[in-house]
Image (cartoon, rainbow, N blue to C red):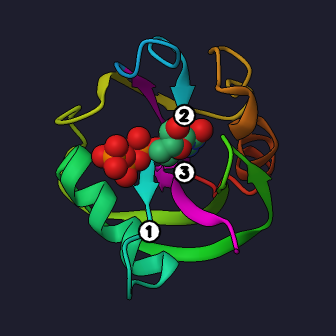
Amino acid sequence: MSDRVVVAGAVYDQGRLLAARRSAPPELAGRWELPGGKLEPGESGEQALVRELREELGVETEPLERIPGEWPLGPGYVLQVWTARLVSGVPAPLQDHDELRWLGPGEGDEIDWLDQDRPAVAEAMRRLPAG
Ligand code: 523
């Protein structure tokens, strides 16, 4: 059986990347991630990403491009990441997170990312658009 997909967004606005600190489950709480969640049946990755970012952060986003690669999570899950543009709204930690941060150039290593997010974060910082 193929792995189930978790999508995450490298959300850009004004030349910065959005990072979200998880509040649950206990083993992940306090670590930072690119926000997202599980693909639901019938959804494309882009559709799932837009839905998850709306539910978790209250914002509208537009996926830009997939960051090549996928990264194993727990058994049976893989992480896929898209860059995305903030279209409207101000992100707020509505679900799953207790803090948000915007990272500018050179600030990608300032926070304790989940290990599995690090390769995509590094690539997302390389692709950071000009402010
Ligand atoms: N990750 C992860 N990195 C990352 C995300 C969005 C998720 O390692 N950037 C992991 C964390 C969880 C699993 O993927 O082990 C599912 O993510 P979660 O809990 O954000 O997905 P949801 O919101 O769809 O989860 P449920 O509401 O529990 O279904």
Horizontal side, residue 60 vs residue 76: left or right:
left
The residue type indicated by label 2 comes to Glu
Q: Which residue carries the number 1 mark?
A: 39
Q: Residues within 10 Å of mark 1 (few under 14, many from 20)?
A: some
Horizontal side, residue 9 vs residue 69: left or right:
left
The residue type indicated by label 3 comes to Gly
Q: Residue at x 74, y 20 (%)?
A: 109
Q: Residue at x 44, y 14 (%)?
A: 29
Q: Residue at x 58, y 65 (%)?
A: 4
Q: Can you give x and y, in whole percent of width and height, for residue 68 in the image?
A: 81, 69
Q: Can you give x and y, in whole percent of width and height, for residue 42 in the image?
A: 38, 88
Q: Are marks 2 and 3 in contact (CB under 8 Å)?
A: no
User: Is residue 119 within the magenta segment?
Assistant: no
Q: Nearer the viewer, mark 1 or mark 2?
A: 1
Q: Is mark 2 within 8 Å of ligand 1?
A: yes
Q: Secondary structure at mark 1?
A: loop
Residue span colored magenta: 1-22
Q: Which residue carries the number 3 mark?
A: 131
- Above or below for 63 versus 43: above
Q: Secondary structure at mark 2?
A: strand
Sequence-first disc among 3 and 1: 1
Sequence-first disc among 2 and 3: 2
